[in-house]
Image (tube, rainbow, N blue to C red):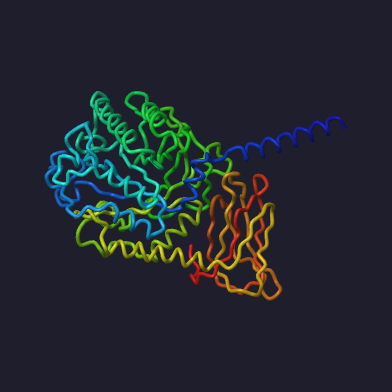
Amino acid sequence: MRLSIFIFLIAITCLYNCTRQSLDVLPTPQQVEWINQELGVIIHMDINIYAPETFDYAHEETLPPVSVFNPSKLNTDQWILAAKSAGAKYAVLTAKHGTGFALWHTKANDYHTGNSPAKIDIVESFIKSCKKYGLKPGLYYNTNMNTLYEAGYVAMTDEKRLEFNKIVYQQLSELWLNYGELFEIWFDGGVMSDARTGIADKVKELIDKHQPNALLFGGPVGWKNVLRWMGNENGLTPYPHWSRAGSKNASEGKEEIHGSNGDPEGKYFIPGEADVPNRKKSAWNGGWLWKAGEDDQVYSSDELLDQYYTTVGRNSNMLIGMAIDTSGLFPDHDARIFEEFGKRLKAREKSRIAEISGSGNSLEIKMEKPSPTDEIEIQENISKGERIRRYKVEALINGEWQQVCDGQSVGYKRMQRFKPVIARSLKLTIIESGGKPVIQRFAAYSFGISPAI
């Protein structure tokens, strides 16, 4: 008898501790704010758009001279208004992309906009435009790749890498100190953290000093407010996808996130950001940078909408590229597609039939009358963590419950489309969870979209 009671108490303690561990992994307030933005843009501009036929990242001698950088119609307001028309809530600018050319007046070298015919500090202009139109500003800086210093594209000695690191520190300090608070900092390819020539510790020190509240895309595991990549540039978040993530130790001893799907029991909360250029991967530079004559490579509003469902609809933020042309504008053709995409998102919102919120393992939307529906949306209260592990949705059709969809992860948002039905009610059943589910929204839509993904 005593042994049975003892075993029972151990089981209860284990269950309590496991549930508590599951609920203790929560987003930071900054991550919650970021997740709620859902949609952002990453604006690409670099000097190599003036020499697309001759430039080669691996050869410093092919770098265009500063004198060719002359975007005579440069208008950062136009960029941000185009982003806003698409529904973007934040914007990231490639302050220093792969060539090493700086879009601000850096003191680290002479290869920057201040020595070009344009003269303008584009980073400063971008930040002002973001503030003017209410988008949260972010900056991209590639710490690993730099043609000007032959970094990343060819092998570097440790001595040369350490000298290059000094340039990185100086430029990051300029960007993070001189332009106000940044919403997101984008590390393309992450931040090197090996013991010999890594910069992670120094970069963390700079962030803590200058930008302690910024979201960090590609930041090392263990930093606060870290975001992670979805493993592709196709607007496709693998499903199921949890914002929680596990880790493993790499051969050199550093800790790395493993797997793009996340881990419902992972010890870190690191939400995903799915980046996709607005031009297809078959375009020049993978679609990220502008080249003349490639209007046929621009994703249509329908394609962007599908990518919205496979990113935001799978519990990640969507980050759309914007390729700026040599005149300094986001091309009219691309801008019109952004505007159409934004209208489609607004139309979807207007098609919402009904919604409900609550907690527990079952919620039911009761319609005033049988209504056509082809889509549901589920949102957990993400500040409480990710609790849903498996669910199903049923529709009450002619007095009988019929399953219309099911799934695993939900997190901040799960959107699912299905064959249109005429339903009197929709019922969400949580089949498995790590703690009591807290549903911020369970909604039905009639957007008229055929079944997909």
Picture quadrant where residue 337 is located: bottom left
135 or 327: which is nearer to us?
135
Q: Residue at x 33, y 62 (%)?
A: 299
The quadrant holding residue 62 is top left
Q: In the shown orientation, is residue 329 left or right of residue 449?
A: left
Above or below: residue 184 compared with residue 289: above
Q: Position of residue 125 (x, y in %)?
A: 27, 46
> Vertical placement of 66 versus 452: above or below?
above
* Callout count: 0
> What residue is at 19 percent from the left and 42 percent from the top?
113
Q: Nearer the viewer, residue 399 or 352?
A: 352
Task: Please give left or right for residue 329 compared with residue 226 in the image.
Answer: left
**Left or right of 186: which side holds 27?**
right
In the picture as drawn, the residue positioned furthest to the front comes out as: 132
Q: Nearer the viewer, residue 72 or 44?
A: 72
Where residue 353 appears, as percent x and y from the top left, is: 58, 68
Viewport quadrant of the N terminus: top right
Query: Is residue 331 depicted above or below 246 in this figure?
Result: below
Residue 245: give x, y in percent of width and height.
Answer: 52, 41
Q: In the rendered view, would you say 350 is above or below 173?
A: below
- Residue 137 in which image quadrant: top left
Residue at position x 40%, y 39% in the image = 218
Furthest toward the right, the residue is: 1
Left or right, 222 with respect to 114, comes to right
